[in-house]
């Protein structure tokens, strides 16, 4: 099947209305791309920070629908120039795999895209479905957590993957011998992706899903993996402390280097043995829960 794109460069104030117009006129997807190469990071839930200049790309699976949407857009926003592109008919999963190769984390952990041969049969090999591309380990925030898991013994542990995304951290922990991982995420698609990846790797029985609004019921855990953002990490410090057994660990990621001191100061009130690791301006913070007396 061929696909068709309309690309428009516009400013932040125009984005919401043009996005709605494209979707109401048949776009099967809308993507935002930075038009000026300015950095922006993952938004927290309910927010959508944007660049000042944006390329908005509407994707269509029908050429006539695309032409109709283009005409409607031209009438409503004559000041905006449009670029039309027909995408080559190709196997999209195969194209994705061309950019995602087997990746090693630490000494003994690999993430392998489905369809590739396992590099080291003796290692912990997580097979990832090409159709579930988000949360693959290619980003530094995930890579830092995977490297931590590789370097620490989680056999028999009861863990929490808070903000599980595609479940890469939960699945890897189970492959490395964790007894159970409780997965929490505000996105139902993330939970679905986690369960599918766990099933593909034969560890679905080790996954327990808890809804975010019931996260306060989580107790007596041995460790928490939380690859989210600095602001929610600040807010969840006491909650994470309450979820853990004495001596339980936390592994926090999604933290920018300039946010490191803020996170460490916050968690030092409830945790000890705080350690940090930096990769490409992203930071991992790990620590141990203080023993109650």
Image: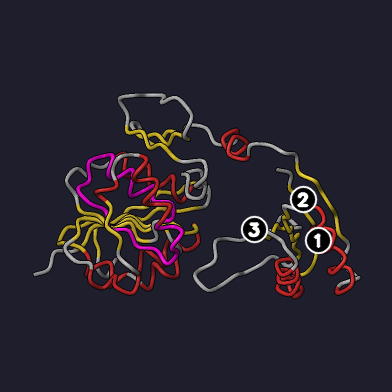
Snapshot quadrant of residue 9: bottom right
In magenta, the rendered stretch is 165-191
Q: Residue furthest left?
A: 293
Q: Residues within 10 Å of mark 3 (few under 14, many from 20)?
A: few
Circle nearer the N terminus (3, 2): 2
- Given contact means CB atoms under 8 Å apart, are the residues at marks 2 and 1 in contact? no
Query: Which one is nearer the viewer's eye here, 190 or 238?
Result: 190
Res 159 → quadrant: bottom left
- Work out which quarter of the rendered image holds the N terminus and state it: top right
Residue 123's spot in the image, x, y percent? 32, 29
Q: Is residue 85 visible?
A: yes
Residue that badge 2 annotates: 4
Mark with earlier residue (1, 3): 1
Residue 35 appears left or right of 119 = right
**Label 3: which residue?**
39
Per the image, the residue denoted by label 1 is 8
**Disc 2 residue crowd, few under 14, some 14–19, many 20+, Cα 10 Å:** many
**Is 257 drawn above or below residue 88 in the view shown?**
below
Q: Mark 3: which secondary structure?
A: loop
Residue 46, position as x, y percentages in the image: 52, 74
Give the spatial CA distance, label 1 vs label 3. Answer: 20 Å
Residue 227 coordinates in the image, percent (x, y): 41, 57
Q: Residue at 55% across / 36% down in the picture?
A: 100
């Amino acid at each position: 099947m061929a696909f068709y794109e309309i690309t428009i460069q516009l400013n932040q104030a125009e984005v919401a209305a043009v996005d709605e117009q494209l979707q109401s006129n048949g776009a099967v997807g809308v993507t935002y791309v930075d038009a000026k190469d300015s950095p922006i990071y993952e938004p927290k839930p309910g927010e959508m920070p944007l660049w000042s200049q944006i390329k908005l790309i509407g994707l269509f699976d029908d050429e006539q629908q695309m032409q109709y949407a283009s005409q409607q857009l031209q009438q409503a926003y004559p000041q905006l120039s449009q670029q039309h592109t027909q995408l080559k008919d190709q196997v999209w999963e195969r194209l994705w795999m061309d950019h995602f190769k087997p990746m090693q984390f630490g000494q003994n952990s690999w993430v392998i895209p489905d369809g590739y041969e396992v590099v080291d049969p003796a290692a912990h090999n997580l097979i990832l479905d090409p159709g579930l591309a988000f949360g693959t380990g290619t980003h530094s925030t995930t890579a830092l957590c995977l490297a931590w898991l590789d370097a620490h013994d989680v056999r028999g542990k009861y863990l929490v993957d808070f903000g599980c995304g595609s479940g890469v951290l939960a699945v890897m922990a189970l492959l490395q011998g964790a007894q159970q991982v409780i997965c929490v995420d505000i996105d139902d698609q993330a939970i679905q992706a986690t369960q599918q990846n766990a099933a593909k790797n034969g560890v679905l029985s080790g996954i327990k899903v808890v809804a975010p609004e019931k996260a306060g019921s989580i107790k007596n855990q041995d460790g928490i993996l939380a690859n989210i953002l600095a602001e929610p990490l600040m807010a969840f410090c006491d909650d994470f402390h309450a979820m853990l057994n004495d001596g339980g660990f936390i592994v926090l990621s999604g933290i920018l280097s300039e946010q490191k001191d803020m996170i460490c100061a916050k968690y030092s009130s409830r945790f000890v043995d705080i350690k940090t690791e930096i990769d490409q301006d992203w930071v991992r913070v790990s620590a141990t829960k203080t023993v109650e007396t």
